[in-house]
Image (cartoon, grey):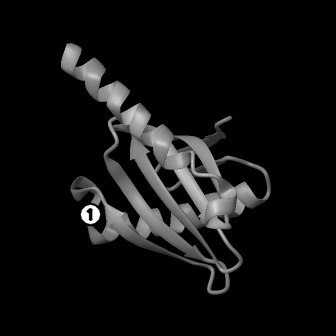
Protein backbone atom coordinates (compact mmCIF):
# COMPACT_ATOMS: atom_id res chain seq x y z
CA UNK A 1 0.00 0.00 0.00
CA UNK A 2 2.86 2.37 0.79
CA UNK A 3 4.45 1.69 -2.59
CA UNK A 4 1.15 2.47 -4.33
CA UNK A 5 0.82 5.74 -2.41
CA UNK A 6 4.44 6.64 -3.09
CA UNK A 7 4.09 5.90 -6.81
CA UNK A 8 0.89 7.94 -6.99
CA UNK A 9 2.48 10.93 -5.27
CA UNK A 10 5.58 10.64 -7.43
CA UNK A 11 3.57 10.55 -10.66
CA UNK A 12 1.45 13.52 -9.59
CA UNK A 13 4.52 15.55 -8.67
CA UNK A 14 6.19 14.65 -11.97
CA UNK A 15 3.05 15.64 -13.85
CA UNK A 16 2.85 18.92 -11.97
CA UNK A 17 6.45 19.82 -12.79
CA UNK A 18 6.03 18.78 -16.42
CA UNK A 19 3.02 21.00 -16.99
CA UNK A 20 4.01 23.96 -14.83
CA UNK A 21 6.35 25.47 -17.41
CA UNK A 22 5.55 29.13 -18.00
CA UNK A 23 3.87 29.78 -21.33
CA UNK A 24 6.37 32.49 -22.20
CA UNK A 25 9.22 29.98 -22.11
CA UNK A 26 7.72 27.76 -24.81
CA UNK A 27 5.84 30.43 -26.75
CA UNK A 28 2.82 28.20 -27.32
CA UNK A 29 -0.57 27.59 -25.81
CA UNK A 30 -0.65 24.69 -23.31
CA UNK A 31 -3.90 23.26 -21.96
CA UNK A 32 -4.34 20.49 -19.36
CA UNK A 33 -7.34 18.19 -19.15
CA UNK A 34 -8.54 15.40 -16.95
CA UNK A 35 -9.12 12.56 -19.42
CA UNK A 36 -11.44 9.58 -19.24
CA UNK A 37 -11.83 7.00 -22.01
CA UNK A 38 -14.55 4.45 -21.45
CA UNK A 39 -15.09 1.26 -23.47
CA UNK A 40 -17.56 -1.57 -22.87
CA UNK A 41 -14.83 -3.70 -21.26
CA UNK A 42 -12.40 -1.21 -19.70
CA UNK A 43 -11.67 2.40 -18.89
CA UNK A 44 -8.56 4.58 -18.89
CA UNK A 45 -8.29 7.75 -16.87
CA UNK A 46 -5.47 10.23 -16.57
CA UNK A 47 -4.24 13.60 -17.68
CA UNK A 48 -4.14 14.93 -21.23
CA UNK A 49 -1.83 17.80 -22.12
CA UNK A 50 -2.35 19.64 -25.41
CA UNK A 51 0.20 22.08 -26.78
CA UNK A 52 -0.88 24.03 -29.82
CA UNK A 53 0.72 26.41 -32.25
CA UNK A 54 -0.44 27.77 -35.58
CA UNK A 55 0.08 24.57 -37.57
CA UNK A 56 -0.44 21.64 -35.21
CA UNK A 57 -1.62 20.38 -31.84
CA UNK A 58 0.63 18.01 -29.92
CA UNK A 59 -0.98 15.88 -27.26
CA UNK A 60 -0.03 13.37 -24.62
CA UNK A 61 -2.32 11.23 -22.50
CA UNK A 62 -0.83 9.56 -19.44
CA UNK A 63 -2.40 7.78 -16.49
CA UNK A 64 -2.10 8.52 -12.77
CA UNK A 65 1.12 6.50 -12.54
CA UNK A 66 2.85 8.57 -15.23
CA UNK A 67 2.72 5.88 -17.91
CA UNK A 68 2.18 7.38 -21.36
CA UNK A 69 -0.85 5.85 -23.03
CA UNK A 70 -0.87 8.00 -26.18
CA UNK A 71 1.32 10.59 -27.83
CA UNK A 72 -0.05 12.24 -30.95
CA UNK A 73 0.02 15.26 -33.23
CA UNK A 74 -2.87 16.79 -35.12
CA UNK A 75 -1.95 18.66 -38.30
CA UNK A 76 -4.52 21.43 -38.77
CA UNK A 77 -3.85 21.95 -42.49
CA UNK A 78 -4.09 18.30 -43.45
CA UNK A 79 -6.77 17.58 -40.82
CA UNK A 80 -4.95 14.38 -39.79
CA UNK A 81 -3.86 12.80 -36.53
CA UNK A 82 -0.57 10.95 -36.30
CA UNK A 83 0.06 8.59 -33.39
CA UNK A 84 3.65 8.55 -32.14
CA UNK A 85 3.43 6.38 -29.02
CA UNK A 86 0.70 3.92 -28.08
CA UNK A 87 0.56 1.48 -25.16
CA UNK A 88 1.59 -2.02 -26.30
CA UNK A 89 -1.88 -3.36 -25.45
CA UNK A 90 -3.39 -0.84 -27.90
CA UNK A 91 -0.72 -1.12 -30.58
CA UNK A 92 -2.77 -2.91 -33.23
CA UNK A 93 -3.45 -1.46 -36.68
CA UNK A 94 -7.22 -1.53 -36.26
CA UNK A 95 -7.07 0.08 -32.81
CA UNK A 96 -4.63 2.74 -34.03
CA UNK A 97 -6.97 3.56 -36.93
CA UNK A 98 -9.92 3.97 -34.57
CA UNK A 99 -7.85 6.10 -32.18
CA UNK A 100 -6.72 8.39 -35.00
CA UNK A 101 -10.30 8.95 -36.18
CA UNK A 102 -11.66 9.40 -32.68
CA UNK A 103 -8.92 11.81 -31.58
CA UNK A 104 -9.55 13.90 -34.68
CA UNK A 105 -13.25 14.11 -33.85
CA UNK A 106 -12.51 14.83 -30.17
CA UNK A 107 -10.19 17.71 -31.09
CA UNK A 108 -12.83 19.12 -33.43
CA UNK A 109 -15.37 18.91 -30.59
CA UNK A 110 -12.90 20.67 -28.26
CA UNK A 111 -12.56 23.56 -30.71
CA UNK A 112 -16.34 23.98 -30.50
CA UNK A 113 -16.24 23.95 -26.68
CA UNK A 114 -17.50 20.39 -26.14
CA UNK A 115 -15.11 18.07 -24.27
CA UNK A 116 -16.91 14.81 -25.03
CA UNK A 117 -17.08 12.54 -28.04
CA UNK A 118 -18.70 9.13 -28.36
CA UNK A 119 -17.86 6.59 -31.06
CA UNK A 120 -21.27 5.00 -31.51
CA UNK A 121 -19.95 2.14 -33.63
CA UNK A 122 -17.55 0.78 -31.01
CA UNK A 123 -19.22 2.38 -27.95
CA UNK A 124 -16.13 4.28 -26.86
CA UNK A 125 -16.70 7.50 -24.93
CA UNK A 126 -13.98 10.16 -24.61
CA UNK A 127 -14.32 12.88 -21.97
CA UNK A 128 -11.88 15.75 -21.42
CA UNK A 129 -12.48 18.11 -18.49
CA UNK A 130 -10.28 21.22 -18.12
CA UNK A 131 -7.95 21.28 -15.12
CA UNK A 132 -7.46 24.51 -13.24
Where does the image place residue 46, in percent across and percent down from the top left? 45, 39
Of the 4 image quadrants, the one containing the C terminus is top right
Give the residue pinned by disc 1.
91
Where does the image place residue 92, in percent across and percent down from the top left? 26, 66
Residue drawn where x is 66% and y is 79% of the image: 76
Where does the image place residue 62, in percent across and percent down from the top left? 40, 47
Residue 64 in sight from this viewpoint: no
Task: Give residue 105's quadrant in the image.
Answer: bottom right
Of the 4 image quadrants, the one containing the N terminus is top left
Residue farthest front in this picture: 25
Residue drawn where x is 27% and y is 28% of the image: 7
Residue farthest right in this picture: 112
Q: What element carries label 1?
A: loop
Placement of 42 over or under 122, stated as above or below: above
Where does the image place residue 59, in percent across and percent down from the top left? 52, 61
Placement of 6 over or under 53, stated as above or below: above
Residue drawn where x is 44% and y is 37% of the image: 45
**Foreground residue among 119 and 6:** 6
**Foreground residue among 123 and 21:** 21
Placement of 36 over or under 94, stated as above or below: above
* 47 lies left or right of 26: left
* 60 lies left or right of 34: left
Amino acid sequence: MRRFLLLSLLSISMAATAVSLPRESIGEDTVRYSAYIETPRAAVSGICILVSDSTEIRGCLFNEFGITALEFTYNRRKDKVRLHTVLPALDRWYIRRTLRRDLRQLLLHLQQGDGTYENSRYHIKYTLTPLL
